[in-house]
């Protein structure tokens, strides 16, 4: 699949509100897989945008900061209108992590996608969401039919009896 190489970060300065370019938190570049829903956009942007352009530019072609994103997306009004008052942009990161885990991603995949320095950090933040992981892993084990000893249906499948 398609991946995007992350080699620097641009957090918003609390002092100036502008983006400040620097290394990633882990000081390591990483490649993040592009979700299928964004593949066409990413490929088109790479093919058509001038070299050095941002992959997801603001309407002025600049980098998005929390402030200009919140203003241009009408973040506060939008989250209030759908009953999610107080939701932050950073909450979307936690939602993505939760969805990855629910989809069966292992801790190393979540660590790499989120850019955590260690799997321990990922487990400290999201370990409680992996509680179903052993059960899901066991259900994905291959089943070899044995006519003399039939296997009971999975707990996630309806009982056939």
Image: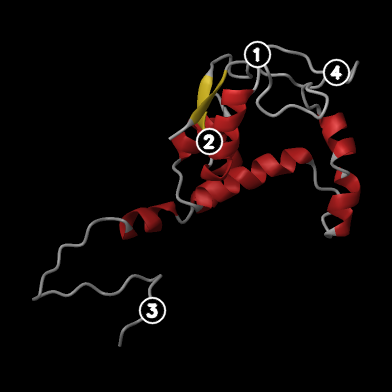
Identify the image quadrant of the C terminus.
Answer: bottom left
Residue linked to disc 3: 158
- Residue 57: x percent and y percent? 74, 26
CB atoms of marks 1 and 3 within 8 Å: no
Between tags 4 and 2, which lies in front? 2
Q: Is residue 60 visible?
A: yes
- Residue 49: x percent and y percent? 65, 22
Q: Secondary structure at mark 4?
A: loop
Q: Earlier in the sequence, mark 3 or mark 4?
A: 4
Residue linked to disc 1: 52
Residue linked to disc 4: 18
Residue that appears at 91% across and 50% down: 77
- Disc 2 residue crowd, few under 14, some 14–19, many 20+, Cα 10 Å: some
Q: Earlier in the sequence, mark 2 or mark 1?
A: 2
CA distance for labels 4 and 2: 27 Å
Q: Is residue 118 visible?
A: no
Depicted 78 relative to depicted 12: above or below: below
- In this rendering, would 41 be left or right of 16? left
Q: Earlier in the sequence, mark 1 or mark 3?
A: 1
Q: Earlier in the sequence, mark 1 or mark 4?
A: 4
CA distance for labels 3 and 4: 55 Å
- Residue 64: x percent and y percent? 78, 27
Q: Earlier in the sequence, mark 2 or mark 3?
A: 2
Between tags 2 and 1, which lies in front? 1
Q: Secondary structure at mark 1?
A: loop
């Amino acid at each position: 699949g398609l991946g995007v190489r992350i080699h620097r970060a641009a957090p918003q300065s609390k002092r100036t509100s502008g983006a400040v370019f620097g290394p990633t938190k882990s000081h390591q570049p990483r490649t993040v897989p592009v979700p299928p829903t964004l593949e066409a956009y990413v490929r088109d942007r790479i093919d058509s945008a001038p070299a050095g352009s941002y992959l997801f530019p603001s309407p002025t072609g600049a980098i998005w900061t929390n402030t200009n994103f919140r203003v241009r997306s009408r973040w506060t009004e939008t989250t209030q209108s759908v009953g999610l008052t107080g939701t932050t942009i950073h909450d979307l990161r936690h939602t993505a992590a939760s969805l990855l885990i629910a989809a069966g991603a292992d801790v190393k995949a979540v660590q790499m996608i989120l850019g955590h320095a260690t799997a321990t950090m990922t487990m400290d933040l999201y370990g409680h969401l992996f509680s179903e992981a052993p059960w899901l892993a066991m259900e994905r084990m291959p089943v070899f039919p044995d006519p003399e000893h039939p296997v009971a249906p999975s707990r996630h499948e309806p009982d056939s009896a």
